Amino acid sequence: MRFRFRLDIKRAILVLMTITVLSLIAVKIGEQDQQEELPPETYITIVNKDGENEKIELERFVMGVVAAEMPASFEDEALKAQAIAARTYILSHCEPYGQPRHGEAAVCCDSTHCQAYVDELELRVRWGENYDKYYAKIADAVLATRGEILFWQDTIAETPFCSTCGGRTENAEACWGQALPYLVAVDCDYCGHSPKFSSYQRFTLAEAASLLATDIDKLYSMQVEAYTPGDRINTLSIDGTLYKGTELRTKLSLNSAAFNWLIIGDNIVFTTIGYGHGVGMCQYGADGMAKRGYDYREILQQYYPGTIIHKDET
């Protein structure tokens, strides 16, 4: 009986050792399979906020761009659409798709020139107690669309976006002089919840005349000469002198080129619809579409009609 008991113990130990070894082998094989399935990291060179070239992992940079360019409170499908628009813009300035905008660096972190970007440290300050929730939300949107970019036929697309189109987007040539078949004015019934859907700015006549480098009495002759396909002011005249609507927008710091005005006493009040240039994706429109159940593919088709989502394999 004692011999059999010892034998049973030895057999049990051998069985446990065999199970342990097999488990370790299975884990190891699983880890290898997982590593083989994960795509290689893509790194890009950017100009950081200190003006220095910095190498950064693409998807991490996309996360920082999405966090900077779109409110984290927006719907998930809107954030996914933003991630693809941001990634497409970045890669359009990387080989093999295009040329860098800053020497060896693809893009910079200046929103007026390329795209805004915030790092994790800034986000902790900005989001405070919501940091974990918002970071996870944006990370999910970026990872869910990892590698996805927009193409027009066999060429990577241009993917500008604006905050609020005000009901209709704009043709690319109306802003930048170059027409693109997928950057055309489309109706947008989704951005009415934007806090910048409409705005008012008041100037004294003296202030407006000074900003426009004209005389006060000539402001009474100001009239619209032509509208853009996106219902923004293309040209207007002041005492016979023609101005671009975008020029007045810049001089007066208006929210968009979709504006009208009214002279009341010694003041002139401008009513502006929308916020931004209006070309491409309307960000509040994307959020509004997502709220109504549209997914990110449908959102991108709304604002970049005719484009196709490709998976980047570089």
Image (spheres, rainbow, N blue to C red):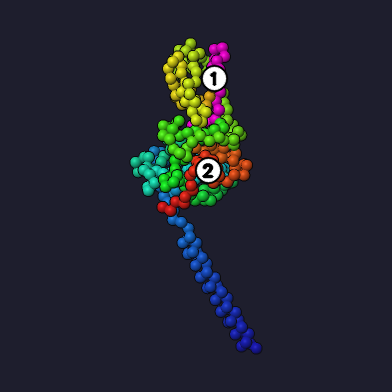
Disc 2: which residue: 301
Label annotation for residue 179: none
Q: Is residue 20 visible?
A: yes
Instruction: Give whichever of 275, 66 is nearer the camera.
Output: 275
Name the disc covering residue 261, or none.
Answer: 1
Residue drawn at x 48%, y 60% is: 37
Query: Residue at (50%, 41%) from the top-left corner?
Result: 305
Quarter of the image with the N terminus is bottom right
The crowd level at tag 2 (other Cα within 10 Å; few <14, some 14-19, many 20+) is some
Point out the tag, 1 or 2, that comes first from the N-terminus. Answer: 1
Amino acid found under the numbered disc labelled 1: Trp
Is residue 277 within the magenta segment?
A: yes
Q: Total marks drawn?
A: 2
Please state the horizontal and vertical placement of residue 248, each as a whole percent of the image.
46, 23
Q: Residue at x 49, y 67 (%)?
A: 29
Quarter assignment of residue 293: top right
Circle 1: is it few (<14), some (14-19), or many (20+) Cα within 10 Å?
A: some
Q: Secondary structure at mark 1?
A: strand
Left or right: residue 143 versus residue 3 is left
Q: Is residue 248 above or below residue 17?
A: above
Indicate the position of residue 23 as horizontal and vertical percent values: 54, 70
Q: Is residue 22 above or below residue 2?
A: above
Q: Position of residue 296 (x, y in %)?
A: 55, 45
Q: Is residue 80 above or below residue 28?
A: above
Q: The magenta stretch spans which residues?
A: 262-279
Tell me, yes or no, whether the highlighted magenta stretch contains residue 310.
no
Closest to the observer, 58 or 86:
86
The residue under the point 54% across, 41% down is 302
